[in-house]
Amino acid sequence: MTVTPFERSLFDRVRLHVLPTKRFKTFAISLYAGVPLAEDTVTATALTPFVLRRGTSSTPETIAFRERLDNMYGAGFGFDIYKRGDSQIVQFRLDVIHDQFVSSSASLLQSALQLLGEVLTSPAQDSQGALRAKYVAAEKTTLKQRLEAIINDKIRYAAERCVEEMCADEPFRFHALGQISDLASIDEKSLYEAYQQWLNQACFDLYIVGDTSLAEVQAIAEKAFRTGGGKPGSYVRSSGERKVTNVKTVIEKMDVNQGKLNMGLRTNTGYADDDYAAMLMYNGILGGYPHSKLFMNVREKASLAYYAASRLDGIKGLCTIQSGIEIANFDRASEIIRQQLDSMRAGELSELEMNQTKAMILNHLRELQDSAFEMIAYDFNSILTGRVRSNTELMSDIQAITPQAIVNAAHKVELDTIYFLRDQKEA
Amino acid sequence: MQQLNYPHVNETLHYEVMPSGLQVYILPKEGFQKTYATFSTRFGSIDNSFSIGDGTVNHVLDGIAHFLEHKMFEEPTGDIFATFASQGASANAFTSFDRTVYLFSATEQIPENLRTLLDFVQHPYFTDENVNKEKGIIEQEINMYKDNPDWRVYTGLIDALYHKHPVHIDIAGSVESIMQIDKESLYTCYNTFYHPSNMILFVVGGIDPEQVMKLVRENQEQKNFEELGEIKRYFEAEPASVKMKKKHAVLPVSLPKCLIGIKDKQLAEQPDELQRRDIVTKLMLDAIFAPSTVLYQSLYDDQLISDSFGYEFNSGSGYAFSIIGGETRSPDELLSRIQRAVNGMLEQGIDSDVFERTRRKRIGGYLRMLNSPESIANEFTRHKFRGGDLFDLLSIYETISLEEVNARLRSHFDWEQTAVSIVSKEQE
């Protein structure tokens, strides 16, 4: 099986990555802008895309701006803010249909890139040196509410609290959306300054997947983006490794029906490392799938939970476990989960578990190619970590993994934090 | 095997009905690595009263369709997830109001995975022991949803809208109802609704339709299906009115969540009428409430809505309602502002520019959806069970008129027919 690689180029400070393909009915466009995750910029950086999505210099009114998207056959436009290692990444996404299916006068790809370029580098302003005050005020409220709403979804809340406790003295403790306490001091002028600084410092990667060519995209994008001259930035690899001295246990009380038992582990292995594939296998056997140890033992054998799973953050080097249990079963569930960690270290890995997990990971890596945005996200890992590893290469790494390699990986994994969200009753 | 061509969306569907009545649809997608297959039965949480032929009427416990879905994955040889995993497939299932869907996605061993899908769904294995074991797991699933404010506000609203219709019952049932489920009742449901004549297989991906159809034929030929009489579903007569105007639940949330429901008095009956009514209603809601509208922006400016604001129209046998809302600082103010704005629209009608732009946007959204094998399979089956065709949507969009949308606006928005559901951290 051959994988069509991205074709690459540069303009100004933007790395351009284009994958020409006729497989989709759309053009998928993704722009990543990353800066180091830092206390003094995290909130302003998070607020920036909220304000930028309200309008541009040519369509400053939000209604007009959104009508523009609707007129492009309902272009899907959105953004995300997340942490990758010690970087804070803003991602803008645009998805527009290919002109062949509709009677459109202007090229939708061109309109889309034009719009994205404006969003990024030509925002709506009240005056020079300030963003639109009305938008900044409204989006501060939106961001504040978004941060306050984290508590609403207890599964997500528990997962984030676990990581926050675990990384209490690292930049990774910050939420990608920033801190409520910073918001009060931000106004349209200070945010404009922060935005300018962000624009000058961020690493930019622009991805396009669809029925186009590198030359076509480059010609349009060069005109649409005004990021200024200079060289593209590069991401700094996070330090990652840490020795755990003692396991931290945090119990938090709230009005909940179900307890959320989460654990945070340090893998001491990252995406750039040679044993990354072994760590993927470790996570897969431990808790990545319905055939994994956590699901089989916590749910199927003990009937203690509806969900019990683990997730690997290969960029930061964390493995996190999450489960929803009857509150009274905390000790029993913790014990069963810790037994699974022991069993991984002891090399209790059946041939069946090996084969199943390999098959699942390989399937996932093949499936990536059916989704434009997933191909983009996969490729972006190499930009983030400096480790170029195609999915076919990772697939052959996975195929070659031995039980011993997984045991070696298991010995690098350290339990760091146990977090339990429970009801208000006395224990 | 028949071919259905849809040149305007560049798709060709292959179709055959097996002697047992099973409908099989295959959609080849050139260049795709993945094959995605759904095996769906028209059996959901609302089907709690039924008979076969002229037999006796069965009343079954709340949550049984969902319980059955959980139990299908167990075979005498073990858990079927393990079999799929060994074959590199990721499998799953879900139960909705009116159907249960079993699915897998895989890039290799497609014949093996297809056979596994067909075989496990066509082979029930329920014992007293394995049925009892599942109760603890489902209890935790129900408890998980109890803590989920979005789910609570949503199900609370449907409960406020409907007196009798089982759509108001939680899909998973209650802890009390599932504790009473036994293997006999599971077999009764299975033997009725999992008959192939009540099911659709949909396979989409980088596949050869001839080969896949041959495999399905051969697999089905090895199995015996006795003819099943017509399945009759019984629904108690549902009053036109809403059950209660307001429903409230207390959960630790940052801001109140508020949904407004509008219950249709008149229900569409004919399949083509149904599909068109759905599309027209969705377009109408979009024209009023989308983020590009004046109403949305004014509500947002006044902090009455956030990005969580949304709206949908949902319908099935004996029910049709729309839901509008999200987080808000003031449910009362949100409700009165929406009422005022919609009343204005009822007088003036929807603007023709807005209508055209919305139509265009929805066509784009529809075409984008066709990139996703998962969406195609699920949406196609959903439409098919109701007698519609997913691939007709483009032509429906093209022929909808503004007058039609305005007429629908006037028939749908009747403030007598509304209810409100709120989840907030304090008692009112």
Image: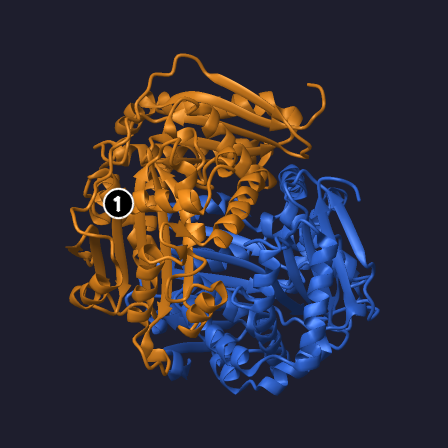
Residue A275 in view: yes
Residue A335's place in the image compared with B132, above or below, is above
Residue density around tag 1, few if under 14, some if 14–19, many if 20 or more, within 10 Å:
some
Mark 1 sits on what residue? A200
Tell whether B8 sits left or right of B93.
left
Residue A19: image quadrant is: bottom left
- Residue drawn where x is 68% and y is 69% of the image: B341
User: B137 or A46: which is nearer to us?
Assistant: A46
Work out whether residue B222 can be spotted: no
Please, is residue A75 above or below residue B60 in the view? below
Image coordinates of residue B66 in percent, x first then y, are 64, 52
> Which chain is orange in the picture?
A
Picture coordinates of residue A347 (x, y %)? 34, 24
Please give left or right for residue A381 compared with residue A182 in the image: left
Q: Which x, y percent locates residue A333? A: 56, 25
Which color scheme does this rendered protein use?
by chain
